């Protein structure tokens, strides 16, 4: 038997994470029977390959706990196969997408989506879907305290253009387009001549580096953000409830 596993056990230590091809998938089951899994439930894991193996945990002196695939009745106490489920409170991500920084000299932007000003999933009634254009510098709305701003919802495509004097052969603009969706919706897109990190607040608001919009300094590079999903910005009922998902 592997080290730390009682004599007579047929099993081998397995990693607590990952899904190696040589190992079966594990099915989570509640000790109390079928039902919705909740925090603090007692659960056990059964191999999906029909071998009736379970995951078991053994405490070994002066060693990290050993997790092994075992069969009951082979010197294994069933208590070793019972786990207490702990669900830690993790906030949902504010955005699902990507951000990139473009080289210098991008000056203008044109897009087909909601405009002419910023819009979000819970703040778009004053915007209309259409074709808009303007300077990238003008896409940043300078709230008194720098924060999330400048997003365009339902964007089908966005083109960022270099200035006439700084265009380089073969690279005068960048086009970002959304794949056609059955619903006709687009993506969330925004561009800024300021680092977007200066809009995001740390958990400790007092640690925000730029505390006033007047301190923002434009740079030659452009930050481009494209998101498939976003959390709302709130403000529906005087900032009382959490933003819409």
Image (spheres, rainbow, N blue to C red):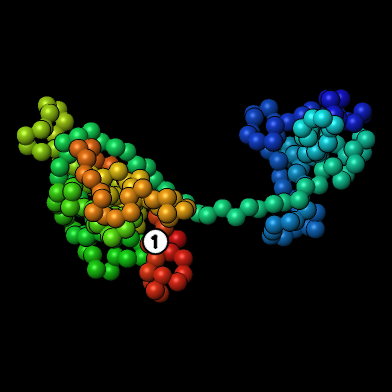
Residue 244 percent coordinates (x, y): 43, 64
Image point (37%, 42%), residue name: 98
Residue 235 percent coordinates (x, y): 37, 69
Based on the displayed image, in which of its 4 quarters is residue 62 positioned?
Answer: top right
| 104 left or right of 61 in image | left
Looking at the picture, does residue 127 appear above or below residue 56? below
| 71 left or right of 239 in image | right
Q: Nearer the viewer, residue 78 or 221?
A: 221
**SS for dot 1:** loop
Task: Using a 10 Å C-alpha cutoff, classify the residue at mark 1 as few (fewer than 14 neighbours), some (14 to 19) or many (20 or more).
Answer: some
| 58 left or right of 102 in image | right
Looking at the picture, does residue 136 appear above or below residue 68? below
Image point (63%, 34%), residue name: 18
Q: Quadrant of the C terminus?
A: bottom left
Residue 160 percent coordinates (x, y): 19, 42
Image point (33%, 60%), residue name: 120
Q: Nearer the viewer, residue 151 or 181?
A: 151
Q: Residue furthest left?
A: 165
Q: Which residue is mark 1?
A: 232
Image point (56%, 53%), residue name: 90
Q: Nearer the viewer, residue 40 or 132?
A: 40
Residue 223 percent coordinates (x, y): 28, 42
Based on the displayed image, in which of its 4 quarters is residue 149 positioned?
Answer: bottom left
Looking at the picture, does residue 179 appear above or below residue 10? below
Is any part of residue 135 visible from this angle? yes
Based on the displayed image, in which of its 4 quarters is residue 218 positioned?
Answer: top left
Q: Quadrant of the N terminus?
A: top right
């Amino acid at each position: 038997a592997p080290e730390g596993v009682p004599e007579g056990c047929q099993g081998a230590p397995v990693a607590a994470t990952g899904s190696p091809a040589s190992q079966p998938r594990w099915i989570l089951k509640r000790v109390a029977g079928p039902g919705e899994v909740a925090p603090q439930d007692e659960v056990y894991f059964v191999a999906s390959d029909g071998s009736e193996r379970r995951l078991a945990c053994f405490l070994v002196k002066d060693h990290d706990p050993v997790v092994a695939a075992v069969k009951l009745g082979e010197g294994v106490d069933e208590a070793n196969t019972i786990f207490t489920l702990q669900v830690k409170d993790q906030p949902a991500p504010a955005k699902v997408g990507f951000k990139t920084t473009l080289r210098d000299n991008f000056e203008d932007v044109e897009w087909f989506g909601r405009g002419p000003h910023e819009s979000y999933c819970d703040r778009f009634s004053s915007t209309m879907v259409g074709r808009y254009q303007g300077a990238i510098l003008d896409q940043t709305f300078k709230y008194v305290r720098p924060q999330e701003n400048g997003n365009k919802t339902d964007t089908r495509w966005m083109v960022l253009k270099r200035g006439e004097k700084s265009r380089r052969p073969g690279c005068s603009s960048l086009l970002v387009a959304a794949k056609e969706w059955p619903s006709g919706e687009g993506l969330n897109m925004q561009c800024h001549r300021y680092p977007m990190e200066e809009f995001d607040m740390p958990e400790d608001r007092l640690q925000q580096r730029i505390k006033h919009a007047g301190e923002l300094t434009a740079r030659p590079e452009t930050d481009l953000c494209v998101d498939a999903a976003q959390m709302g910005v709130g403000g529906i009922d005087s900032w009382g409830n959490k933003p819409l998902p």
